[in-house]
Image: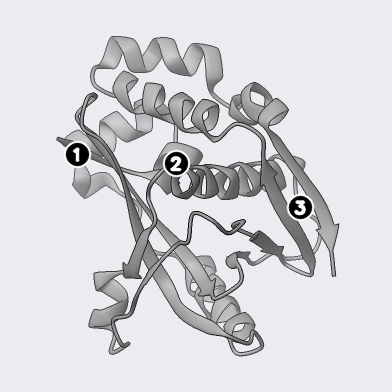
Amino acid sequence: MITFSAKELCTMSCMQIKMFAEHPERRPQPSAMVEYGEKFQRAVADTIPNIIGEEMRGKYVNNELGITINFSNDIVCDDKIIEVKSVHGKYETWYLQSSILQCAFYKSMMLIGARHLETASFYVNLGNERVQTEIDPSRSIRYILIFGEENYEIFVSDPYQIVGFFENKAINCGDWNSARRWDGMYKHHEYEALKQYIKYKSIF
């Protein structure tokens, strides 16, 4: 069983994922922007009612393919899940699209089976309480993206297509040749490949 990060599958190329798998020492260290993002998330969480927990980890497993994909939801409430992105002033369209795609991917994994969520170990190690919850499959999963000062609700029409796409990407990270081929087709075009299955609307 090979384990992948859902965030890396969304934000890195196959070649990057392959390189960091072989050379973990080359992974970039957390930057000041990451620290700012964490503070922004904390400030947002302080304003949200009915929170179950923050940094709640889920795990999608495909035994047939031999892959596990881990993901972490920023804020989980009893009526919605929230992904938080800090944004400074003007932003590039690709960043919004990448953030929407990430939300759609996480939501899709939960819709098709990854319904157990619990506080990620790193967050517990920071002194926070470990909590667990189960996503109720009979209820609609509201997934909200807080993108700086903008709020969006994310909808998916075919979660299997979205998850299947990233399963294929994970498989293609297995060797350099397949990673290079995948990137040649989809690098910087993943949102375009999946946008037919994703809708979003601005909310307040």
Identify the colour scheme used: one colour
Question: Rounded to the nearest whole Å, what is the CA distance between mark 3 and mark 1?
Answer: 31 Å
Quadrant where the N terminus sits is: top left
Question: Rounded to the nearest whole Å, what is the CA distance between mark 3 and mark 2?
Answer: 32 Å
Q: Which residue is mark 3?
A: 91
Please name the residue shown 49% across and 39% down the image: 10
Q: Callout 2, which amino acid?
A: Ile
Under tag 3, what secondary structure?
loop
Q: Residues within 10 Å of mark 2 (few under 14, many from 20)?
A: few
Q: Earlier in the sequence, mark 3 or mark 2?
A: 3
Nearer the observer: mark 3 or 2; the answer is 2
Under tag 2, what secondary structure?
loop
Nearer the observer: mark 1 or 2; the answer is 2
Q: Relative to the observer, which residue lies in front, 59 or 170? A: 59
Q: Position of residue 95 (x, y in %)?
A: 67, 46
**In the rendered image, is residue 29 in sight?**
no
